[in-house]
Image (cartoon, rainbow, N blue to C red):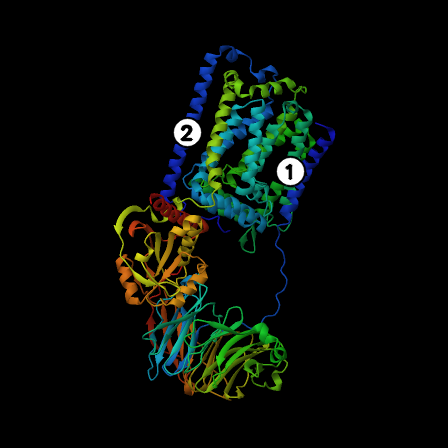
Amino acid sequence: MPGMNSGLDISDPAVVAAFKAALVHQGLIALLIFGLLGLAWITLRAWLPAAGAGPAPEAAAPVAEPAWRRLLRIGFGLLWVFDGILQAQPKMAVGLPSQVIEPIAAASPHWVQRLVNIGGTTWSYHPMQAGAAAVWVQVGIGIWLIVAARGPLSRLAGLASVGWGLVVWVFGEAFGGIFAPGLTWLFGAPGAVLIYAAAGALITLPGRAWHSRRLGRLMTAGTGAFLTGMAVLQAWPGRGFWQGISHGQPGTLAGMTGTMAQTPQPGFLSAWISAFTSFEEAHGFAVNLFAVAALAVTGAAFLSGRPRLIRPALIGFTALCLADWVLIEDLGFLGGLGTDPNSMIPMVLLAAAGYLAVARAPAEAAEPASGAAGSWRDRLRIAAAPRTLASASIGSVTSLGAIGVIILGAAPMAAAQASPVADTILAQAIDGSSTPLDSPVPPFSLTDQHGRDVTLASLRGKVVLLTFLDPVCTTDCPLEAQEFRQAGQLLGADDRRVELVAIVANPVDYQLGYTQAFDRQEGLDGVPNWLYLTGSPARLAQVWRGYGIAAQIAPAGSMIAHSENAYVIDQQGHLRQEMGFDPGPGTAATQSSFAAELTDAARQLLRQS
Amino acid sequence: MSRPRRRSAATIAVLLPAAMLAAGCAGTAATSAPAAQAAPPSPSLNTSLDTAAGTWAAVVMGGSATQHNNFWQLFIRPAGSTRWKLVTPPGTADNGGLVLAGSGGQALVTGFRPSQDLTYTPLIQTSDGGQAWSSLNPLDAALASAPDALAVKPGSGQMLALLDGGTAEEAAPGSTTWNTLASQQTLAATRAGRRCGLQSLTAAAFTPAGIPALAGTCTRPGTAGIFTPGNGTWQAAGPVLPAALIRQDITVTRLTRTAQGMTALLQAGSGPDARLLAAWSPGGHWTLSPPLPLYGATLTSASFGPGSTAAIITSANRGQITTGARSAWLPLPPLPLGTATLAPSPGGTADALAVRDGTLTVWQYAPGGTTWTKVQVINVPIPYGSSG
């Protein structure tokens, strides 16, 4: 998938250090948000004691939160916080698109891959902001769910969970793989985060629905129908689940668990999964029969809507989920790139909530008086803000802090997304940072691709971005040329005050025919400020020496080996920066990043003039 | 909550799993339609070529699993010598393959088929047996992957190139501009092309008279698709095939100019019935070899040597040699392991160039012998990883 992969080493020290720094920086701001809110709350309560002592609006129309909702709210709140912490793992910033999202989407149809690629590309271009956003958004939603027990803030927390859950389900889980072959509940279908979103939707329901018996029946019926459907899917012939081994190869389930056993994890866990894989290979039919039966029986019990049938089914289902979580899903969060504990824990929470909804449903309660909503509108007026804050509960204040944390993560990402250019951190991770210089550069007198003489002196008054390219290079030089081309586009109107210059780095294929063919190949023949300079081998060698460029003929069919540097020369002909210009993996993200680095360097000199 | 809404919610609760179920079941592998019968593949670029400077051979070496670590090497056995030497042209990555074209006398032009991010074809020439090389203006497109995709008119330097897309282009000596000579479509639309049912172009050459000639695959049975320009159009210039082959589709797999005139290899039919014929024309009239049954194998390498000799290797790793017009094909002893191409010589002798990773081993066969004799080993410093 183009664009999704930054191509960098996911443990690249420069990127990891920058990610940690960003998280620490934003973490301090998050603490500051909570600290300031707490301070304001305490101060206002002391300043406006009547408001502070007054009844909270939620308390004005108290509706006791039912156990099922509390379970979902706190359970999924903790899961979001845990997921947020997982997103802070060092490899996440660079590794998530290429190592997690791309493989998940690989088996899905092209339209799914294209859609997922949009999100992955955005992430790859801005890995620091995206990685940090995932951390803070998820931690924020988690805290918000945990502390907001009732009222509009609580329902909004559920809505946030739905929204973010769907974003993650589509772009992070490729729709939970439901459009890919091999779909199975055992491996997490229909995607863990879709269950988060379903739970969020239930939390979003208004207070008048909390104690509805019909809601409880709907929850258990939905769970039952889902599990029954999954049982049918699991029993469907021809999908490889009935065979432990097929044609000498592991069956579908054994193949999956065998792969899971290879991921980095504690030895005992790997041994358990390997043992289960061997068991599955030997008794594939029996294992699948058990899974189908367990799902079907649990589904039927939930469909009945009777608590006395659901309770034992729930106990058995919980045991099945825990076994699946350990032996098949491999806990889901190990290996340095785990994003969540997979689907079984959320599944148990959702099923348990359904049971609680039918087993402990008291008499239906009335919706809080509409006056409560009206009072909320009153409280949102700016003039009423101090009194509103003073009268808020600690849960509400913490909820506001959690919303601040979400904004803390989302705002920089939203701002970064507005720019189509990748962060320069990618280029710096490949070639390091350049150091500022100020020294005269060696002059040159060469011929451009149109046959015109060009000297360094003739370029005075313009910023010169200079590099050395082999016109018949098959790998790096075309990428570097594209980085120059993109830099020219990014410069916009400033482009007229900048010359993009390359000098031939090949002592054999140096003729004008080659510079012209290269320009056509790279779409540079129409770029007005592009110069591709050449000369006799002797003259080229002199220029290479002046700039410290080595261009050597390599043996046996290899291309020319030459140094890969870029030079930023100011309007007076002084060298101001020398950059490493090895394009690294040459992905769309790294190309954009190098272009941004060149653009920044040129703009800096233009601003100084 | 109104009652209809409850109903729709309940419906969703039941239908959603059903939809997911259907989505999961839809993920089974689809069956693919059978592929249409295609023309036989061109022989590989592993080949040898005879010029006044000696015998040249291009073979792929490296043997890595990744294509980027396949490096093509050029060797020459200078005229009068029995030893081969490495003369791979410098300065350009040759992972895409080398295409050779003798340009008369000592000279040889080599085209580098583009690979990876390179899209045009660098050209280079030597006039001293590969000791010194000088670049020619590049071809602004990719050469076809065929051993006869490049031809040079002896004495003038005019060039003819067959491109990846099936277009033939020509360039005047020293010119940077290439002009379209013909495409498969334009040639197929001519009277000669229609009579042939031209499906694709496979080779380009200059006739002894210096006229461009193009060859291809005919879908009209019994027709050999070799064409030369004349009277403002293209005219059939191929051999008339024997009656036994008039029901077979004919593909011209090789067409080149040798010291004796034009030489071609024709494949008649496909699959188990496929047969191979060599054809020679000193100018105008063609002489055919007896048909060589391939027994279901395909042609992997074909080489032309001095004195109208030709040698081929099939996918069954069998070698055959013919020593000239009207001569029968003679089977060679089982080829040494890794034989990439053969270099035939007059009298029925041949060198087999066998490759393993970065080592080229030259084996020699003398007529009447039953085995190959190892005569030379050349170790090539393959620059693994330099192009990927």
- Could you tell which of marks 2 and 1 lies nearer the N-terminus? 2
Identify the secondary structure beneath mark 2: helix
Camera-side residue of B34 and B68: B68
Q: Which residue is mark 2?
A: A29
Q: Which residue occupies the foreground of this view, A194 or A400?
A: A400
In the image, residue B153 above or below residue A125 = below
* Classed neighbour count for the residue bearing mark 1: other residues with Cα under 10 Å, few (<14), some (14–19), many (≥20): many
| Secondary element at tag 1 | helix
> Picture coordinates of residue A52 (x, y %)?
50, 13
Tell me: A206 left or right of B229: right
Amino acid type for the residue under numbered disc 1 = Phe
Residue annotated with mark 1: A226
Can residue A454 be seen in this snapshot?
A: yes
Question: Quadrant where the C terminus of chain A lies?
Answer: top left
Marking on residue A103 = none
In the rendered view, would you say A105 is above or below B341? above
Evaluate if marks 2 and 1 touch, with contact meaning CB atoms under 8 Å apart.
no
Q: Compare residues A141 and B103 and report the one nearer the observer.
A: B103
Q: Amino acid at mark 2?
A: Ile
Q: Is residue A224 left or right of residue A274?
A: right
Residue B187 place in picture, x, y as percent: 58, 76
- Residue B198 in the image: above or below residue A306: below
Q: Nearer the viewer, mark 2 or mark 1?
A: 2
